């Protein structure tokens, strides 16, 4: 029905009875194709959800997955379910991970190095950003992709060096704060 409505609307036919017999067969065929495609999209969506769910076994995330948009989103949802997710942010993050050849296993290792420190580091960053106004802890949190970027800034030297070059508009105090956090992570993991 949706397909018929879309097709007929584009051709300005409000009812099936308005369509010349000459075109009816073609319109019905197109409608059937769209209905099949719609069903396939629904199946693909369900398969995608099953694929994401299959990455979690007995409360553990299976790191033996290829890095792709779905495995990355599943990783983010597993470790940061209470964080805001943004599809475009995850896509950009995936491109960055691929650029630096960072696997899910590498990402997990970096996360484990800093997971206990992240809440404190996050508050420090947002306090630094908001010195002149009140900071509401619930409102000042990284999105899923943002927290991963900060984890990489803290644990991956090559990533950090490249990010520093991108931080042209970031105050020096912010960069110094992240550098101090990097030092604390190194001390904590030695």
Image (tube, helix red, strand yellow):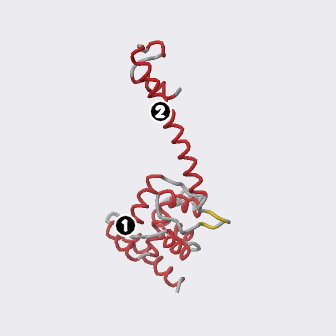
Q: Nearer the viewer, residue 133 or 54?
A: 54
- Residue at the extreme bottom: 190
Of 119 and 40, the residue lying toward us = 40
Nearer to us in this view, 151 or 72: 72
**What is the number of the mark on residue 34?**
2
| Left or right: 58, with 127 as reference point | right
Question: Which residue shows up at 46% across the image and 78% down it?
Answer: 182
Q: If you read the primary sequence from the N terminus, does the residue marked by circle 1 or circle 2 appear first?
A: 2
Total numbered circles: 2
Task: Please rate how many residues cluster around mark 1, counting C-alpha atoms within 10 Å: few if below 14, some from 14 to 19, many from 20.
Answer: few
Residue 38 versus residue 98 in the image, above or below: above
Nearest to the observer: residue 99 or residue 169: 99
The answer to which quarter of the image holds residue 177 is bottom left
Residue 153 is labelled as none
Secondary structure at numbered mark 2:
helix
Q: Residue at x 56, y 74 (%)?
A: 112
Q: Position of residue 19 (x, y in %)?
A: 43, 15
Residue 178 x/y as whole percent: 44, 73
**Do we see residue 131 in this rendering?**
no
Mark nearer the viewer, 1 or 2: 2
Mark 2 burial class by Cα count in 10 Å: few <14, some 14-19, many 20+: some
CA separation in Å, label 1 and label 2: 38 Å
Residue at 47% x, 33% y is: 34
Q: Position of residue 134 (x, y in %)?
A: 53, 59
User: What residue did someone put label 1 on?
Assistant: 99
Q: Check disc 1 and report its element: helix, strand or loop.
A: helix
Q: Residue furthest right?
A: 58
**Residue 11 appears in the rendering:** yes
* Position above or below: 35 against 164: above
The spot of residue 114 in percent (x, y) is 54, 74
């Amino acid at each position: 029905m949706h397909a018929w409505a879309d097709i007929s609307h584009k051709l300005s036919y409000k009812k099936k009875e308005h369509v010349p017999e000459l075109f009816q067969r073609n319109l019905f065929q197109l409608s059937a194709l769209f209905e099949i495609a719609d069903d396939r999209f629904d199946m693909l969506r369900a398969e995608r959800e099953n694929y994401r769910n299959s990455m979690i076994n007995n409360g553990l995330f299976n790191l033996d997955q290829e890095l792709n948009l779905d495995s990355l989103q599943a990783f983010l949802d597993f470790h940061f379910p209470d964080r805001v997710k943004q599809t475009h942010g995850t896509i950009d993050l995936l491109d960055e991970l691929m650029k630096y050849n960072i696997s899910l296993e590498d990402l997990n290792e970096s996360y484990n190095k800093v997971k206990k420190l992240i809440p404190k580091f996050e508050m420090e960053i947002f306090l630094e950003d908001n010195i002149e106004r009140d900071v509401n802890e619930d409102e000042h949190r990284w999105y899923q992709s943002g927290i991963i970027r900060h984890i990489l800034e803290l644990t991956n030297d090559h990533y950090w060096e490249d990010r520093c070059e991108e931080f042209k508009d970031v105050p020096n105090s912010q960069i110094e704060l992240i550098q101090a956090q990097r030092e604390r992570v190194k001390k904590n993991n030695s």
